[in-house]
Image (cartoon, grey):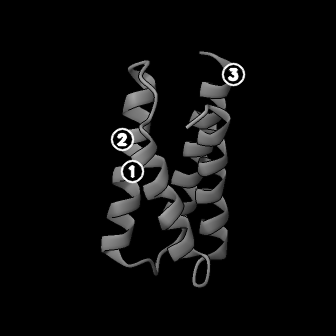
Amino acid sequence: MPEPTRGLHDTLEELHAQLARTESLDPALRDELRQAMEEIRARVDAGAPAEARVAERVRQLMLRFEAEYPALADAVGAVVRALARLGI
């Protein structure tokens, strides 16, 4: 697995772990984040780049998390940065 892709996988795993530790998160918001993570992972595993719309969706989620869930926002931000390293 190429290094940038491996980095993205590691970052997604960290976000998944952080999400599991965040108990008070709104279920709809949790599902939206999980769907975005699954879409990114599926596309990367298939060898296709994640689409820019997915990256934008993740950026918007990060902004929504910043005030109430700063640790989770940091993890989402790491995904955004990993996507940027892949040119997305």
Q: Which amino acid does label 3 sit on?
A: Glu
38, 23: nearer the viewer = 38
Amino acid of disc 1: Ala
- How far apart in space, not on screen, are marks 2 and 1 (Cα)? 5 Å
Q: Residue 64 carries which label?
A: none
Could you say which is closer to the camera, residue 63 or residue 37? Answer: 63
Residue at horizontal 38 percent and vertical 20 percent from the top: 46
Q: In which quarter of the image is the N terminus?
A: top right
In the image, what residue type sits under mark 2?
Glu
For the residues bearing labels 2 and 1, Cβ distance under 8 angstroms: yes
Question: Residue at position x 51%, y 52% from top?
Answer: 16
The residue that disc 3 covers is: 3
Q: Position of residue 32 (x, y in %)?
A: 34, 62
State the CA–CA distance, disc 2 to disc 3: 20 Å
Callout 2 secondary element: helix
Image spot of residue 85 (x, y percent): 68, 35
Mark 1 secondary-structure assignment: helix
Q: Residues within 10 Å of mark 1 (few under 14, many from 20)?
A: some
Reading the image, the residue beneath label 2 is: 39
Q: In this view, does 27 lie to the left or right of 40?
A: left
Q: Residue at x 37, y 32 (%)?
A: 42
Residue 87 found in image quarter: top right
| In the displayed structure image, the side of residue 1 where residue 60 appears, left or right | left
Residue carrying label 1 = 36
Asked whether, in this view, residue 2 is left or right of residue 41, the answer is: right
Estimate the x, y position of residue 58 in percent, counting from the top left. 48, 56
